[in-house]
Image: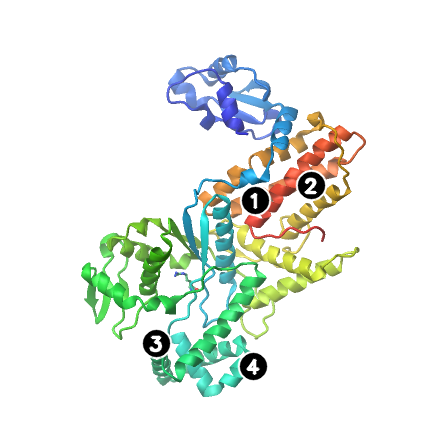
Amino acid sequence: MNFKRCLADSIDLELENVDFENLIVESISPDKGDYCLPCFSLAKLMKKNPLEIANIILASIKQTDLIEKVEILNGYINFFLNKSYVAKNVLENFNIADLKLADGKGEIVLIDYGSPNLAKSLHIGHLKTTIIGESLARLFEQCGYVVKRLNYVGDYGTPFGKMIGGMLKWGSMEEVKQKGNDVLQDYYIRFNQEEKDNPELTQLARDIFKKIELKDKEIYPIYQTIVDIALAEAKRMFDLLGVKFDDYRGEMYFNQFAPQVIKMLEDKNLLVESQGAKIVDLTPYDLTPAVILKNDGTTLYTTRDICAAIERYKEYHFNKMIYVTAIQQNLNFRQLFKIMELAGYEFAHDMEHVSYGMMSLPDGKISSRRGKQAVLVDLMDYALSEANNIIKGRKFEIEDPSDVAKKVARAVLSFAVLKVDRNKDCVFDVKTAFSFEGETAPYMQYTYTRIESVLRKYRDTKDKADYTCFNQDAFELVKYINDFSIIIRQSLIKRDPSIMVKRLLDICKAFNKFYTATKILDDNVAATKAKINLITALKDVLALGFNLICIDTLKEM
Ligand code: ARG
């Protein structure tokens, strides 16, 4: 039910260029009604003071079932809704399937996220791109779009020359196969250190990378094995986070299209020579020039992104393509989008960069298995062990404790990323993240289990529900249920799942307030039925909302 529209419709007064629906807002406290209409902005138009205007509007209001009473206070018209009428209407017509919105009309959205650089361990920034990207993917799907999840792996460049160089100097393929990803990282780090005193190593890394590009008989298979190992480790992380990609083609794959792209840019007179390199001059657009081809003939990050955009368009005919990366890549994407536009690709206007602020770990709080800065795998281990501790402390038996622990750990990580406004920096709050109190993921999951447990105890009767027992606490929940589609849309439009997180926290708080003060199952069958209808709808809404922010529901914890 669109309360604002219904209230606006009840006002039997025509004012030119005034849409009452847009003027009506939620009241700040229950004593001022559920919604109010501030009359101040109408003073100029109606040439009267707000109190007079309020009286004129009040006189025109038609009585409807929705409205219990209307009051005037200081230039505001306060609407009080008829609680039992609204509750019956909202809850008995509630169908979770209606929250699958049709806005997107099946349009195709590509989301490029999660994309790690395979030469380096995944770090906590990758948690952000992965969780924000996945939450957006789910929001788009909920709003009726068809989503393709693209992981554009960074598998190109001299870092791979360094890794292989390190392996040939200090290790062996045997060791790599035995010890896996960690030892690859060690070669890379050692190579970077020794390179400082030994510039020959820089050339060595370049030469090796050249051989990778030329698919050298000896080096290329080594490269492939290394990429496979690093990618398997990255996939293990994504799996733990509950994220599945449709496509893992990355920089190396798309680089094969570079010669065509360079020719295309040349044909369109967009490339100019600068100190032996080829660049697109973007200074007329207040952007720094973008290098497309270095003087040694190698391509750049932007070059490969141009290739990928063109190929992806050919393949998917997308209506939107969204890149989820750290805010530091803003300039890069502005350059990319400008180049696509200058090259005449209509779809340039459908490319979008969704950036995010930095998340850091509190110093020394999470131990690193490799004695260096904690990376994503350390954070995940930490989360899992904390979640296990919670479960171990429970007095009752849990059916599948390791599954519960996994879901709690994952929820804590998703929540850490999504609770803050997307572009804000934040520190992962190790101390409170696992608490059952306050604004935490376990608090939300626990709230859900409370609903589950009440519903398990309830035996349905065929009685009619009686909603007249609903107090303000219950009514707040009814309104949250009614307005949930608005929150889904807002989160998507702003590309910010933190809007959804905040609303879900509010719902959980409101439910717990209601739960503490009200006996849900009591002797009055009709009233009990009404409360059951309320929490059944609430359960569906929470399950849907949790899923949109990458938090699993639990039956017990
Ligand atoms: N691999 C990059 C990084 O870790 C992110 C890639 C984003 N996607 C893209 N098409 N450029 O920073």
Q: Give the residue at mark 3.
A: 213
Assess mark 2: CB under 8 A from ligand 1? Answer: no
Quadrant position of residue 82: top right
Q: Earlier in the sequence, mark 3 or mark 2?
A: 3
Q: Earlier in the sequence, mark 4 or mark 2?
A: 4
Residue pictured at 54% horizontal, 77% vertical: 180
Q: Give the residue at mark 2.
A: 512
Q: How is the image coloured?
A: rainbow
Amino acid carrying mark 2 in the image? Asn
Vertical placement of residue 20 versus 412, above or below: above
How much space separates mark 4 and mark 2, taking CA atoms?
51 Å
Q: Nearer the viewer's eye, disc 4 or disc 1? A: 4
Q: Earlier in the sequence, mark 4 or mark 1?
A: 4
Amino acid carrying mark 1 in the image? Lys
Is disc 1 placed on a helix, strand or loop? helix
Q: Give the residue at mark 1.
A: 502
- What percent of the width, then of the height, locates residue 349? 32, 49
Disc 3: CA contacts within 10 A as few (<14), some (14-19) or many (>=20): some
How much space separates mark 3 and mark 4, taking CA atoms?
26 Å
Q: Nearer the viewer's eye, disc 3 or disc 1? A: 3
How much space separates mark 2 and mark 1, taking CA atoms?
15 Å
